Image (tube, rainbow, N blue to C red):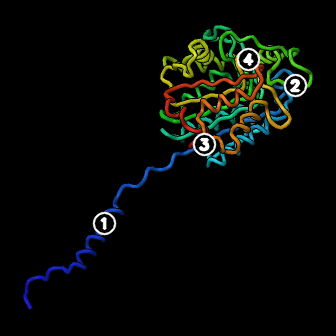
């Protein structure tokens, strides 16, 4: 036999090629990790009398709303926090939002829902044309709109944020708040009465004044456009988007009504949430966010017309099916 090394047989060569392919496959880069998703759901059927001048603001369906939004989040695989009535405090909400903001990265998803009363406090920092800051009425105190937008501003660039608010709110700077006497006795508007708002502010004025100044000071030169002004731009321009200075995250907000309206409570869901759930149809809905909003709005009476606006570069985000992680 020759001392030279024998040439590999065709069968051996085939095995060698196959093993190289397997090695290359193992060495190929891993698929990018799936996007993370977190959610926070607040539902308040009452507030603390001590924080609101003796008023408890009884509602019936807000806890149901929060649980139903959490059920959608669970269906989509989100890690959720649910804060109901007494647990829906300022500290608990802010802690949950800041945890999400510090955890989520570009491409990740955050879903925030609120169901409860909307209120107002006088503006002391001078950015509100109507001289009022709108609020969410949390159990032990109000969350001012500027605070909410500052917290949303903590999210990293590219994070997708969906906010659903079944509450009255300010959509433009021409707000004229409906009075409680404007509603039938059998209806419960999600609106803090003006007299209660004035009393609440008077009894806790130093807290709310300092809060507004602290938020303004923290924002400094990077201060975002006032949320009321952003909504006013949308109303005037007819566009969905509001230009917000250095706003990094991509935010879609769908709220329960227009600026001169209020969201209504119900027995099992708020009016806005009830129609949202019907349109969503347990995940059968396949349209985008704009069509989702339009379908919900079409199901509600003219006295309650949900609003939609966006902050940041939301082009591709808007084209997705709602709640897509």
Q: Are marks 2 and 1 in contact (CB under 8 Å)?
A: no
Q: Are marks 3 and 1 in contact (CB under 8 Å)?
A: no
How many angstroms separate mark 3 from mark 4 (CA)?
29 Å
The N terminus sits in image quarter: bottom left
Crowd tier of the residue under label 3, counting other residues whose Cα lies within 10 Å: few below 14, some 14–19, many 20 or above? many
Q: Which residue is mark 3?
A: 38
Q: Which residue is mark 1?
A: 21
The C terminus sits in image quarter: top right
Q: Is residue 35 left or right of residue 227?
A: left
Q: Residue at x 85, y 30 (%)?
A: 59
Give me the disc on residue 120. Answer: 4
Q: Nearer the viewer, residue 184 or 146?
A: 184
Instruction: Say if residue 20 shows up in the picture.
Output: yes
Instruction: Say if residue 141 shows up in the picture.
Output: no
Q: Which residue is mark 2?
A: 187
When the figure is inspected, residue 298 is found, relative to residue 202, above or below; the finding is below
Crowd tier of the residue under label 1, counting other residues whose Cα lies within 10 Å: few below 14, some 14–19, many 20 or above? few
């Amino acid at each position: 036999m020759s001392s030279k090394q024998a040439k590999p047989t065709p069968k051996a060569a085939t095995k060698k090629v196959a093993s190289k392919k397997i090695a290359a496959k193992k060495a190929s880069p891993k698929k990018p990790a799936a996007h993370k998703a977190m959610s926070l759901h607040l539902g308040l059927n009452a507030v603390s009398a001590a924080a609101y001048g003796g008023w408890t603001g009884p509602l019936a369906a807000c806890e149901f709303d929060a649980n139903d939004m959490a059920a959608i989040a669970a269906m989509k695989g989100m890690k959720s926090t649910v804060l109901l009535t007494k647990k829906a405090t300022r500290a608990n909400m802010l802690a949950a939002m800041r945890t999400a903001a510090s955890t989520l990265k570009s491409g990740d998803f955050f879903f925030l829902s609120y169901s409860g009363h909307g209120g107002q406090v006088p503006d002391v920092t001078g950015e509100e044309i109507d001289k009022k800051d709108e609020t969410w009425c949390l159990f032990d105190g109000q969350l001012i709109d500027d605070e909410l937008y500052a917290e949303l501003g903590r999210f990293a660039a590219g994070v997708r944020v969906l906010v659903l608010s079944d509450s009255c709110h300010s959509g433009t700077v021409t707000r004229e708040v409906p009075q409680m006497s404007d509603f039938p006795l059998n209806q419960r508007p999600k609106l803090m009465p003006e007299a209660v708002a004035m009393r609440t502010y008077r009894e806790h004025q130093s807290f709310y004044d300092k809060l507004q100044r602290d938020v303004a000071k923290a924002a400094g030169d990077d201060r975002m456009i006032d949320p009321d002004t952003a909504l006013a731009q949308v109303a005037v321009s007819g566009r969905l988007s509001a230009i917000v200075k250095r706003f990094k995250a991509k935010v879609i907000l769908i709220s329960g009504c227009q600026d001169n309206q209020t969201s209504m409570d119900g027995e099992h869901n708020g009016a806005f949430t009830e129609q949202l759930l019907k349109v969503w149809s347990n995940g059968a809905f396949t349209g985008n966010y704009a069509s989702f909003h339009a379908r919900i709005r079409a199901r509600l009476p003219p006295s309650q017309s949900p609003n939609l606006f966006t902050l940041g570069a939301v082009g591709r985000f808007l084209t997705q099916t709602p709640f897509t992680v």
